[in-house]
């Protein structure tokens, strides 16, 4: 019996010491714990609680009966969804626009951060950063209005200039290939400056002694950028790439909705606009929820796959 007590006592003492340490940590850092409660409450209320609504994807949802009173139909909504020709069009368009954004918009903030990092005139660097950040804070409604004022076929600033030089007006917003270039260019202009913040922060973590050693060895700016700067932010680039791949099936509603029109629906009709039209305009709540759930599952697969590949390549990944 005494031996059993001796074996239990150290465990009990360790548990007591652990509780004392946790209590001491809470008393010391209670302000930080209270601050942490705000994002926790946000995620619980707006991210986890709404997951209950995914049950609608497996029901013949009736707005008046609610989720608990609606009839369960299993995977019938998904069968109906996959049988629609429009489903494959919106999935294709979502993948196309996101892949093009990944190809052109993803490198843009990296290049801007590298260029800003090379600036030595402080006031010019700060002014350039401010001007590059501003588009991020402009609503897509306002951006859409600016786009129509500049690229409209009739009365657009750019087409007025083109016709005044004796050339024919270019259908920037009514011909799908031209519209695609305007869509991508506008996205780069709106997001690239804000994305540089992350990479500029990563650049500050690079050891300055590496640059000093490179100067001693006679390395120029290009070689320092290639052999020190880019490897120094590689892990950040990989993490951002994984997160971007996780959103490969998720596309914002405002940008394609504001910039799209009936003449370019072959490219502008995406998952988010489909869900809006099916769910709110046509009241097909179950079908819209099924599409949203399909989108989330595909996004999860891309995140897990990209993270696994990154880890096998020796990078840290996101988890």
Image (tube, helix red, strand yellow):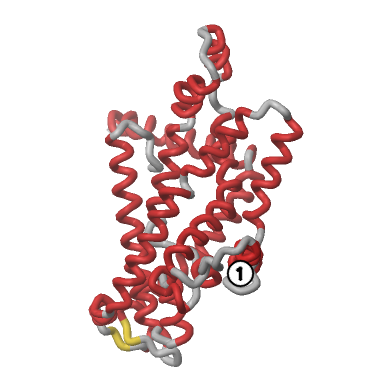
Q: Is residue 139 visible?
A: no
Q: Residue furthest bottom?
A: 64
Q: Quadrant of residue 56?
A: bottom left
Whether residue 282 is situated above or below residue 299 in the rendered picture = below
| Residue plotted at (53% across, 69% down) | 259
Camera-side residue: 273 or 50?
273
Point out the residue furthest to the right here.
123
Compared with 194, 46 (above or below) is below
Mark 1 crowdedness (10 Å alpha carbons): few <14, some 14-19, many ≥20: some
Any part of residue 187 in sight: yes
Assign a secondary structure to mark 1: helix
Q: Residue at x 51, y 44 (%)?
A: 108
- Which residue was labeled with disc 1? 148
Question: Furthest-top residue in view?
Answer: 216
Q: Looking at the image, which is closer to me, 176 or 291?
A: 176
Q: Give the quarter of the image for residue 263.
A: bottom left
- Percent coordinates x, y for residue 11 in the rendering: 37, 34
Residue 247 position in % (x across, y down): 41, 56
Q: Is residue 77 left or right of residue 186?
A: left
Numbered label tally: 1
Question: Where does the N terminus fall, quadrant-wise?
Answer: top left
| Quadrant housing the C terminus | top left
Q: Taking 70 as reference, is 155 above or below it?
A: above
What x and y, as percent, mark residue 214?
52, 13
Q: Considering depth in this image, is 81 or 222 the residue closer to the camera?
A: 222
User: Residue at coordinates 55% horizontally, 58% vertically from top-left?
Assistant: 186
């Amino acid at each position: 019996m005494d031996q059993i007590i001796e074996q239990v006592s150290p465990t009990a003492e360790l548990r007591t010491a652990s509780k004392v340490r946790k209590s001491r940590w809470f008393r010391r850092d209670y302000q930080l714990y209270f601050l942490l409660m705000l994002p926790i409450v946000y995620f619980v209320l707006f991210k986890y609680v709404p997951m209950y609504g995914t049950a609608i994807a497996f029901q013949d949802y009736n707005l008046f009966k609610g989720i608990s009173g609606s009839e369960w139909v299993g995977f019938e909504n998904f069968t109906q969804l996959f049988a629609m020709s429009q489903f494959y069009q919106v999935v294709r368009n979502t993948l196309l626009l996101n892949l093009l954004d990944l190809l052109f918009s993803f490198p843009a903030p990296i290049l801007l951060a590298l260029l800003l990092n090379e600036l030595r005139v402080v006031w010019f660097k700060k002014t350039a950063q401010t001007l590059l950040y501003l588009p991020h804070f402009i609503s897509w409604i306002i951006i859409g209005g600016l786009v129509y004022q500049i690229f409209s076929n009739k009365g657009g600033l750019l087409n007025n200039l083109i016709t005044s030089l004796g050339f024919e007006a270019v259908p920037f917003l009514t011909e799908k290939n031209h519209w695609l270039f305007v869509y991508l260019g506008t996205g780069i202009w709106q997001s690239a400056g804000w994305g540089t913040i992350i990479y500029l922060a990563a650049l500050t973590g690079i050891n300055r002694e590496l640059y000093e050693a490179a100067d001693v060895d006679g390395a120029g700016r290009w070689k320092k950028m290639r052999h020190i700067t880019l490897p120094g932010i590689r892990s950040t680039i990989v993490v951002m790439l994984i997160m971007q791949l996780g959103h490969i099936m998720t596309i914002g509603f405002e940008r394609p909705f504001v910039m799209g029109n009936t003449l370019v629906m072959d490219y502008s009709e995406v998952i988010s606009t489909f869900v809006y039209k099916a769910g709110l305009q046509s009241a097909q709540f179950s079908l819209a929820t099924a599409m949203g759930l399909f989108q989330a599952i595909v996004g999860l697969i891309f995140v897990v796959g990209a993270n696994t590949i990154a880890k096998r390549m020796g990078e840290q990944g996101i988890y």
